[in-house]
């Protein structure tokens, strides 16, 4: 039986990865932050199968202890302040967690168990102002947010520890991946949650920022499989994980509404643009400049050819299926909420 340590286990990816590794009969350890109210987040349903260790990415002592307790064969570093918009409001804590935190965990591995294999959650945000389309492992980086800059440090320190200390340390450069467990501040979940509420008549409209930005969106379940595959190779390396398809936020909006039978028609331009329900003429989407970013990543499109070839990784959940799953999930959550409030 192998031991795995997952940082960020309560998050979206942490939860799917924990399920995946439990199915593969790993003993799973997860680090959790101490909170005033205990919250297992996305692993509430499997909490009895996980060995939790209280630790924080900014506290190297706690990570050394986590390595000692878990004696992990594989370490997946998924913990991060992962919301790009917040990284302008909290640039220093983002740097501490997403940047220096990576050195903290690498040092814990080096001190306690240098033969452990390490996965770093790198990101397409490192490409930022993209230098070529599509992006590959060879595309130069140009991050556009404090989040992207901090992650770039994490990416390079991982490579550096591989080259300096011969650690088996990989970075997965993952493009956007979403799911039914995505936080509601991210644009996809914000849209699917609002679509469900608008459809049930408990929300008037959805407010968004830049609807022209383009993202390469996959499903988290497919992406955690790639993380594991990276740690099963003969040699540690870095890989782009993406779908090789890109779509605008506007297209995501259209598809999500369409799934519940609402056709959105766009009117006006710029910050005055609105989306209307074609059959009722009611406004269902508005622009709110407060959601614009100080610097935007306009387009991301990843080429996963290396991962396809060397890891045998292929994406299984299509974009249409991703949108469908997210909308269906939010529809049933909202239906339950309405039932409960009617009983009360
Ligand atoms: P997520 O849902 O926001 O989860 C982040 C996790 O990090 C949570 O469990 C959170 O714990 C934990 N965390 C935050 N600060 C911490 C700290 N100081 N110490 C310990 N744990 C801390 O993110 P995700 O979508 O699953 O993403 C997983 C990783 O992949 C992140 O590193 C993210 O930056 C990266 N990534 C994500 C995507 C994507 O599209 N999803 C793409 C590329 C890379 P709490 O529950 O206590 O907040
Ligand atoms: O924004 C635009 C916004 O916040 C996507 C993280 O997982 O993926 C994620 O970062 C796009 C941006 O994700 C709203 O301006 C418009 O262009 O869903 P998001 P992100 O910034 O791409 C990368 C790969 C990561 O690594 C990150 O951890 O949508 N947008 N209107 C909006 N975005 C939000 N959140 N809210 C809006 O109202």
Image: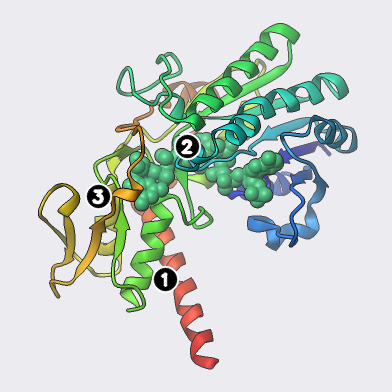
Residue 148 appearing in the image: yes
Check residue 172 in the rendering and tell me which mark sits there, or answer none. Answer: none
- Pick the quarter of the image with the N terminus: top right
Q: At numbered mark 3, what does the secondary structure look like: helix, strand or loop? A: helix
Q: How many marks?
A: 3
- Residue at the location (42% across, 71% down)? 331
Give the quarter the ligand 2 occupies: top left
- Residue at the location (89% across, 33% down)? 68
* In the rendered image, the vertical position of residue 216 relative to residue 254, given as above or below: above
| C-alpha distance separating marks 1 and 3 | 20 Å
Name the residue carrying label 2.
Answer: 88
Name the residue carrying label 3.
Answer: 250
Residue in the foreground of this view, choosing between 35 and 212: 35
* In the rendered image, the vertical position of residue 72 relative to residue 284, given as above or below: above
* In the rendered image, the vertical position of residue 258 relative to residue 140, given as above or below: below
- Residue at the location (43% across, 56% down)? 189
* In the rendered image, the vertical position of residue 201 relative to residue 55, given as above or below: below
Front label number (1 vs 2) = 2
Q: Position of residue 15 (x, y in %)?
A: 64, 50
Residue in the foreground of this view, choosing between 95 and 23: 95
Quarter of the view holding residue 66: top right
Check residue 331 in the rendering and tell me which mark sits there, or answer none. Answer: 1
Which of the marked residues, 1 or 2, is nearer the chain's N terminus? 2
Which of the marked residues, 2 or 3, is nearer the chain's N terminus? 2
């Amino acid at each position: 039986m192998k031991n795995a340590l997952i940082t960020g286990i309560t998050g979206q990816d942490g939860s799917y990865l924990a399920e995946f590794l439990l199915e593969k009969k790993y003993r799973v350890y997860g680090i959790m932050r101490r909170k005033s109210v205990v919250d297992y987040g996305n692993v509430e349903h499997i909490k009895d199968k996980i060995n939790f260790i209280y630790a924080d990415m900014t506290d190297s002592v706690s990570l050394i202890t986590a390595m000692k307790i878990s004696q992990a064969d594989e370490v997946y570093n998924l913990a991060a302040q992962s919301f790009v918009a917040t990284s302008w409001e909290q640039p220093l804590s983002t740097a501490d967690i997403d940047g220096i935190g990576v050195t903290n965990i690498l040092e814990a591995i080096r001190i306690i168990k240098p033969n452990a294999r390490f996965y770093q959650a790198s990101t397409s945000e490192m490409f930022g102002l993209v230098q070529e389309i599509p992006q590959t492992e060879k595309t130069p980086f140009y991050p556009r947010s404090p989040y992207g800059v901090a992650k770039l440090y994490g990416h390079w320190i991982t490579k550096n520890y591989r080259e300096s200390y011969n650690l088996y340390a990989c970075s997965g450069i993952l493009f956007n991946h979403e799911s039914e467990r995505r936080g509601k501040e991210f644009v996809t979940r914000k849209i699917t949650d609002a679509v469900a509420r608008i459809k049930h008549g408990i929300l008037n409209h959805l407010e968004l920022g830049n609807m022209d930005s383009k993202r390469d969106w996959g499903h988290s379940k497919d992406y955690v499989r790639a993380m594991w595959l990276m740690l099963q190779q003969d040699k540690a390396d870095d890989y782009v994980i993406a779908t090789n398809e890109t779509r605008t936020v506007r297209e995501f909006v259209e598809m999500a509404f369409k799934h519940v039978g609402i056709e959105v028609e766009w009117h006006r331009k710029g910050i005055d643009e609105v989306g209307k329900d074609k059959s009722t003429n009611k406004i269902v989407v508005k622009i709110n400049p407060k959601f614009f970013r100080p610097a935007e990543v306009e387009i991301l499109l990843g080429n996963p050819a290396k991962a396809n070839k060397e890891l045998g990784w292929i994406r299984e959940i299509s974009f249409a299926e991703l949108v469908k799953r997210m909308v269906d999930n939010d529809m049933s959550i909202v239906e339950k909420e309405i039932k409960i409030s009617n009983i009360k």
